[in-house]
Amino acid sequence: MMTAEQERQQWDDFRGGDQQAFAQLFLRYYERLFTYGCKLAADEELVKDCLQELFQKLWQRRQHLGAVTSLQSYLFIALRRQVGDALQRSKAQQRLAAEPEFEITYSHEDFLISEQLSQEQNEKLQRALNKLSKREREALYLKFFDGFSYEKIAEIMGVNVQSIRNLIYQALQALRKVFVAVWLFLLLAHHG
């Protein structure tokens, strides 16, 4: 695990043209970015293309990039924009509004509680999660699966912090109405 100082140094080395630092950044973040990208778009090939294009742009523009306070959130924001742009260009996605579709399909493995819930409870949870709005699902994903703070989620999604708090609260309330035990688990996992 890199310290914040090591991460800043690696970013600075990359901006200075160090190919090894660039390769390390790519390897360090690719999997998490790919997973997040697949939540934004169901098309894995599109996500791979977006990641390749993102890292190509980073390399080409490295000398013009500034310092970042959180490299991970910077990359998530950049990928979110990249995927959104790609989806808007896609003829298959012409119905897309200004933001990317965020079709999260949750599985009980995502919550690491598969052994604690019956199949009926898992199905109930799936239905409840998939009834949430796209933005609620995205906020929950970033909070509980990627561990971002409310502030970082707001930065990634391009809204204010209170809106993120409201989205997560509303989503958890909706889940609570449908499935109290899962809501309690999420609440405890969040505070644990």
Image (cartoon, rainbow, N blue to C red):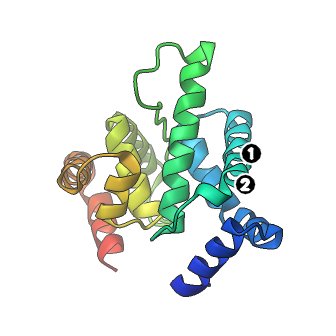
Residue beneath the point at 34% across and 80% down = 192
**How crowded is the residue under tag 1: few (<14 C-alpha within 10 Å), some, or many (20+)?**
some
User: In terms of sequence position, does the residue under pointer 1 or pointer 2 come before the other?
Assistant: 1
Q: Which mark is residue 82?
A: none
Rendering coords of residue 112 (x, y %): 51, 65
Rendering coords of residue 170 (x, y %): 20, 47
**Quadrant housing the N terminus:** bottom right
Q: Is residue 191 above or below residue 123?
A: below
* Secondary element type, mark 2: helix
Rendering coords of residue 149 (x, y %): 34, 67
Residue receiving disc 2: 59
- Do the numbered discs 1 and 2 sit on residues whose CB atoms are within 8 Å? no
Residue beneath the point at 20% across and 49% down = 163
Q: Can residue 110 be seen?
A: no
Rendering coords of residue 59 (x, y %): 72, 54
The amino acid on which the numbered mark 1 sits, given as a three-letter code, is Gln
Q: Is residue 94 left or right of residue 190?
A: right
Q: Is residue 148 left or right of residue 154?
A: right
**How crowded is the residue under tag 2: few (<14 C-alpha within 10 Å), some, or many (20+)?**
some
Judged by depth in the image, the label closer to the viewer, 1 or 2, is: 2
Residue receiving disc 1: 52
Q: Is residue 76 above or below residue 93?
A: below
